[in-house]
């Protein structure tokens, strides 16, 4: 995790760095810091958020047209002022920011201590800047060359930016395993963990590849070298991101804005990909691989967090519609358990950020075993989207709130389209069912809009249960993953313990927890195992649990039993997860707000988990 940003040009760097860090705060927010080149190399850093850094820097000299900035999610060393980045080298001539983990920091540190280096922090990052200093001093090298040689000794992941007091007109960036984007402006350059700090200054970017080092000097073209010292020609991409998408647009929180954006984000996920009249689905990004996917003996879905829940819905969809066996794996487990992967396997990675370290590593493993790897990512140009053979972007637009909302519904939408496409290709779906689902899909954005109109009701329900200490979420079939996702949302942002369970499985444990203090959220649409879910509701009621039921509009049976009812419009069973997850997002949101929690930046979490 951690967000990094750097600027070199003719403008004042400080406001660019601070604004950039605020955009990157979703990547970590336990401490922040900057280094500016003015009277010397001046580092200002402190524990807390970027706003705390601003307050801290307000009395300092913040002039300078070259600078680097960092917002941290602690890995090595607790979040405090000393461990915050940037870190100086021993002679304070270099300053460095880092996103990633230097795995062999311990032997490197021991060696450097022997050579007289003294360390101030507990971080792996400080070891790296001392190592660069050591290489530079001993071999009398330029900063770029010293960084390159130092990095040949490093095991781990990094995206770094380095400044040198003795060569004030240069910033060096490098990456391996952590993302880094270079922004190319007129007489100015930017470096950042993603394009969001860059977008208002230039739309020309270069996505640095692993083990590449970039040298940025005003008045010169960027020089990109491989770690083997080969000069590379950078490929310049045009950004399509819109600035408005990065701002709150009148909403109190990004999360609320993103929940309310779903009618549009879901439309964007399916735009141009299905045609009700001709009864077809087209996914251009995977068209060269769809035969291979349709023929696969099995599909393995790898993901983390909310994306893993979307993967579970994907499993139900692909197995049900396309009749291809699917396994859904936590990427972190998959990569370390010596999985069996064959050349005729297809591995689909689902990731909003496209940067999650475990998901990326799981894909690399699958690729090394010869499997076909497919991405379902939101961030265009992200690491996962670049290493996959093919993929379908979710096109949900930037998601800033740490708790994922619109990305989830877009992932489910894309997985549904993928399942339909494969089903059509295989002939495993009756034409009437195919048409029915397509026709229902077309209505989904308007139906999500309708669900959003129940926000006030959901807010009222949130008020009733905001002080609960536990929550249970139950669902069956397609709605079991929705229950898991609902529980995760509540945990993440309100810090209330919540569990998602398959409704019938409740009898095998969680039922012991149910009493009058336990709110139970049940997803009980009229399709699927409706009657069975009604019985599960009865079982909860018999133990005095409080029922919040998400039901199909017009339902009376579940409504009679429930303490609170939230209606969603009628749709096909396969599409219910999209509609049913929206009120659960709102419920978590309002409960968290009522409890005074920082909804967009929940404690200990980060949006893009680029460490294992
Ligand atoms: C973090 C985020 C979650 C996200 C998960 C996977 O835990 O807080 O919201 O679902 O990472 O992220 P990805 O970008 O791979 O979807």
Image (spheres, helix red, strand yellow):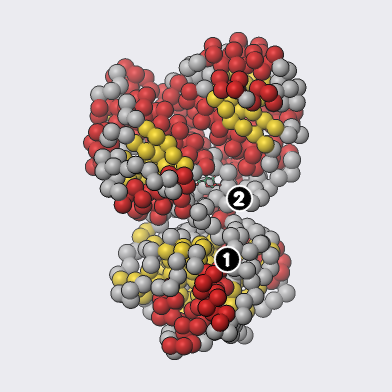
Determine if residue 123 is in view: yes
Q: How crowded is mark 2: few (under 14 residues within 10 Å), some or many (20 or more)?
A: some
Image quarter (top left, top right, bottom left or bottom right) of the N terminus: bottom right
The yes-or-no answer for disc 2 within 8 Å of ligand 1 is yes
Where is residue 227 drawn, in percent x and y?
A: 36, 72
Q: Quadrant of residue 410?
A: top left
Asked if residue 102 lies left or right of residue 454, the reply is left
Q: In which quarter of the image is residue 117?
A: bottom right
Q: In which quarter of the image is residue 209?
A: bottom left
Q: Residue at x 34, y 30 (%)?
A: 325
Q: What element carries label 1?
A: strand
Q: Name the residue under label 2.
A: 605
Asked if residue 391 lies left or right of residue 20, the reply is left
Determine if residue 247 is in view: no
Where is residue 170 drawn, in percent x and y?
A: 47, 80
Q: Residue at x 51, y 30 (%)?
A: 481
Q: Is mark 2 on a helix, strand or loop?
A: loop
Q: Mark 1 points at which residue?
A: 70
């Amino acid at each position: 995790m951690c967000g990094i940003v750097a600027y070199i040009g003719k403008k004042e760097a400080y406001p660019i760095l601070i604004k950039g860090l605020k955009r990157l705060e979703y990547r970590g927010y336990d401490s922040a810091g900057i280094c500016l080149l003015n009277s010397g190399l001046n580092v200002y850093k402190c524990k807390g958020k970027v706003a705390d850094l601003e307050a801290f820097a307000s009395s300092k000299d913040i002039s300078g047209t070259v600078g680097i900035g960092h917002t941290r999610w602690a890995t090595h060393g607790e979040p405090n002022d000393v461990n915050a980045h940037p870190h100086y080298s021993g002679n304070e001539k270099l300053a460095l920011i880092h996103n990633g983990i230097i795995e062999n920091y311990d032997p490197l540190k021991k060696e450097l201590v022997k050579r007289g280096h003294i360390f101030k922090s507990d971080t792996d990052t400080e070891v790296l800047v001392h190592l660069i200093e050591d290489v530079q001093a001993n071999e009398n090298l330029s900063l770029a060359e010293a960084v390159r040689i130092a990095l040949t000794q490093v095991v781990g992941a990094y995206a770094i930016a380095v400044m040198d007091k003795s060569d004030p007109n240069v910033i060096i960036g490098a990456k391996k395993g952590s993302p880094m984007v270079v922004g190319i402006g007129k007489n100015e350059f930017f470096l950042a963990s993603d394009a969001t700090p860059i977008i208002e200054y230039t739309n020309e970017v270069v996505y640095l590849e692993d083990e590449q080092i970039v040298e940025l000097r005003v008045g010169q073209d960027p020089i990109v070298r491989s770690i083997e010292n080969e000069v590379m020609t950078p490929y310049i991409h045009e950004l399509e991101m819109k600035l408005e998408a990065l701002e709150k647009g009148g909403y109190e929180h990004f999360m609320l804005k993103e929940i309310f954006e779903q009618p549009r984000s879901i439309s964007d996920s399916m735009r141009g990909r299905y045609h009700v009249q001709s009864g077809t689905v087209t996914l251009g990004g995977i068209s060269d691989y769809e035969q291979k996917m349709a023929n696969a003996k099995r599909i393995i879905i790898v993901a983390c967090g909310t994306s893993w829940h979307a993967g579970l819905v994907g499993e139900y969809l692909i197995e049900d519609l396309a009749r291809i066996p699917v396994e859904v794996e936590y990427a972190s487990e998959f990569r370390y358990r010596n999985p069996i992967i064959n050349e005729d396997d297809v591995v689909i990675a689902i990731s909003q950020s496209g940067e999650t370290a475990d998901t990326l590593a799981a894909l690399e493993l699958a690729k090394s075993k010869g499997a076909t790897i497919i991405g379902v990512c939101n961030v265009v140009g992200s690491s996962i989207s670049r290493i996959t053979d093919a993929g379908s972007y979710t096109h949900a637009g930037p998601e800033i709130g740490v708790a994922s909302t619109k990305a989830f519904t877009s992932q489910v939408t894309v997985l549904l389209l993928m399942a339909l496409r494969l089903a059509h290709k295989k002939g495993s779906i009756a034409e009437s069912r195919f048409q029915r689902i397509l026709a229902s899909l077309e209505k989904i954005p308007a139906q999500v809009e309708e669900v959003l109109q129940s926000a006030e009701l959901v807010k009222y329900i949130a008020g009733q249960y905001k002080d609960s200490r536990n929550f249970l979420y139950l669902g069956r079939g397609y709605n079991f993953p929705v229950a898991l996702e609902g529980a995760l949302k509540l945990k993440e942002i309100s810090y209330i313990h919540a569990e998602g369970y398959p409704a019938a499985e409740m009898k095998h444990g969680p039922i012991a927890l149910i009493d009058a203090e336990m709110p139970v959220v049940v997803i009980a649409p009229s399709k699927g195992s409706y009657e069975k879910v009604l019985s599960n509701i009865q079982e909860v009621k018999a133990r005095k649990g409080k029922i919040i039921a998400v039901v199909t509009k017009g339902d009376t049976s579940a409504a009679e039993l429930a303490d609170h009812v939230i209606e969603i419009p009628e749709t096909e069973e396969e599409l219910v997860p999209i509609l049913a997850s929206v009120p659960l997002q709102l419920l978590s949101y309002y409960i968290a707000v009522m409890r005074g929690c920082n909804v967009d930046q929940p404690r200990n979490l980060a949006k893009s988990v680029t460490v294992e």
